[in-house]
Amino acid sequence: MSDSSKRPATTDGSDNDHQGDKKRVRLAQIVKDQQLLASQSIPTPHTPEVIHTVRLSDALRKKILVTGGAGFVGSHLVDRLMSEGHEVVVVDNFFTGRKANVEHWLHHPNFSLIRHDVIQPILLEVDQIYHLACPASPPHYQYNPVKTIKTSTMGRLGEICVWTINMLGLAKRVKARILLASTSEIYGDPEVHPQPETYWGNVNTLGPRSCYDEGKRVAETMMYAYKNQNNVSIRIARIFNTFGPRMHPNDGRVVSNFIIQSLQNKDITIYGDGSQTRSFQYVDDLVNGLTKLMNGDYDSPVNLGNPDEYSIRDFATKIKEFTQSSSEIKFLPKVADDPTQRKPDISTAKRELDWEPQVHVEDGLRKTIEYFRGEVEAAGEIIPTGPDAAKPGTPKTPKGASWSGW
């Protein structure tokens, strides 16, 4: 064997160059993927549509806290704030909220999710606080009325909004503006119709709904105490009945119960004779109102609702028609303290916020029906929650009846 045959083969560096090229391609793809993830939501079974986000400069981008942000209204608000390019922190204890409502944002660098109960203080640096933390469904807030009262005064997380001492303290410390999602429930069973913000209400302080009604009243009082004493920048939204995708299937509200019952061809159950009236707004309209209120200059309470008024009986009939259901409408004895009428006077919102609902109730219903159709198909069967106190996700009876609270 010659000496030359024993010598190892030499390379001219081409293999190293090839490996380097492959690494550069991989790195370029990683950067591209990260840029994509930072520009949109990720489709999920719960939120299949892609929501694109804009890129804001540091001077324009706000850090915004949404308590109860994994709930029905909160998650839609998060979608809006994320799409506008802000940094969003969701704090939720998942009492009524669901992780599935926000999982399409978990990858995004501008989004943070903290599992936390605001009965305990939390230290954050934020520019704005949307406080949407409290069970808003009557069966849910009646399940633990003491905790519901604590929500309004000490803090408890969930779907809709209450003001808490801890959130007020946080707003005071970091000089953040805070918006309280209050409710039309503070008007009780109104004797003035429609209800303007100047109406003081007609509330039974000892009734089954009082833990929620009075808690919200206390929350509004605390808001103004902190404004007057500590110069905290506040906003108060009095929210009327709202519906749309991501409503909790077992929250016992009119829209969700009627749709679920209709889709399954089960009896549509109404407490009372169905003559009580409600005004229903689609969730996108509410989110528009909330953001306009937060970023505007008006700091007195504002009604956010749709003045289109329906009797509960007519609303049930409409849903039955839209779902092409064979369900029958059944009337059961009236529930204590169920208001006879609700309709917002939105003159203030029109004047101060240039806001009024844009989505027709029928259009919103069609979208909501499609959402619940998917929920029913995924679950196989959903038994709606009746009017009695019930823990979220734990229906009390196979004949769930609809409650007309929002």
Image (spheres, rainbow, N blue to C red):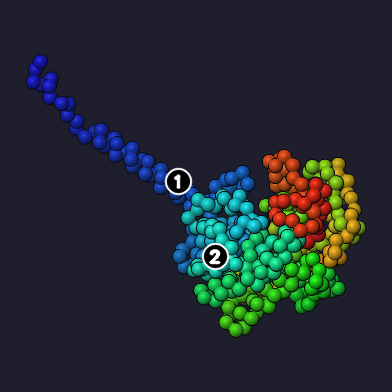
- Which image quarter holds the C terminus? bottom right
Task: Tell whether 248 sits left or right of 207.
Answer: left
Circle 2 sits on which residue?
Answer: 64
Give the image location of residue 180, x and y in percent: 65, 70
C-alpha gap between disc 2 and disc 1: 26 Å
- Which image quarter holds the N terminus? top left
Instruction: From this view, report whether residue 178 is shown above or below residue 404.
Output: below
Give the image location of residue 240, x and y in percent: 75, 65
Q: Residue at x 74, y 42 (%)?
A: 381
Q: Residue at x 52, y 69 (%)?
A: 127
Q: Is residue 71 visible?
A: no
Dot 2 falls on a residue whose secondary structure is: strand
Residue that protrudes farthest toward the top in the picture: 1
Q: Residue at x 56, y 50 (%)?
A: 104
- The answer to whether the residues at label 2 and label 1 have Cβ atoms under 8 Å apart is no
Q: Amino acid at mark 2?
A: Ile
Instruction: From this view, report whether residue 248 is shown above or below residue 291.
Output: above
Circle 1 sits on which residue?
Answer: 33
Give the image location of residue 217, x and y in percent: 72, 74
**What is the tally of numbered marks visible in this picture?**
2
Q: Residue at x 67, y 52 (%)?
A: 246
Crowd around label 1: few <14 · some 14–19 · many ≥20 (10 Å):
few
Crowd around label 2: few <14 · some 14–19 · many ≥20 (10 Å):
many
Can you tell which quarter of the image residue 13 is in? Answer: top left
Task: Tell whether 227 sits left or right of 13.
Answer: right
Can you tell which quarter of the image residue 219 is in? Answer: bottom right
Q: Is residue 268 visible?
A: yes
> If you read the primary sequence from the N terminus, does the residue marked by circle 2 or circle 1 appear first?
1
Give the image location of residue 133, x and y in percent: 64, 64
> Of residues 266 and 232, which is closer to you in this image?
266
Q: Amino acid at mark 1?
A: Asp
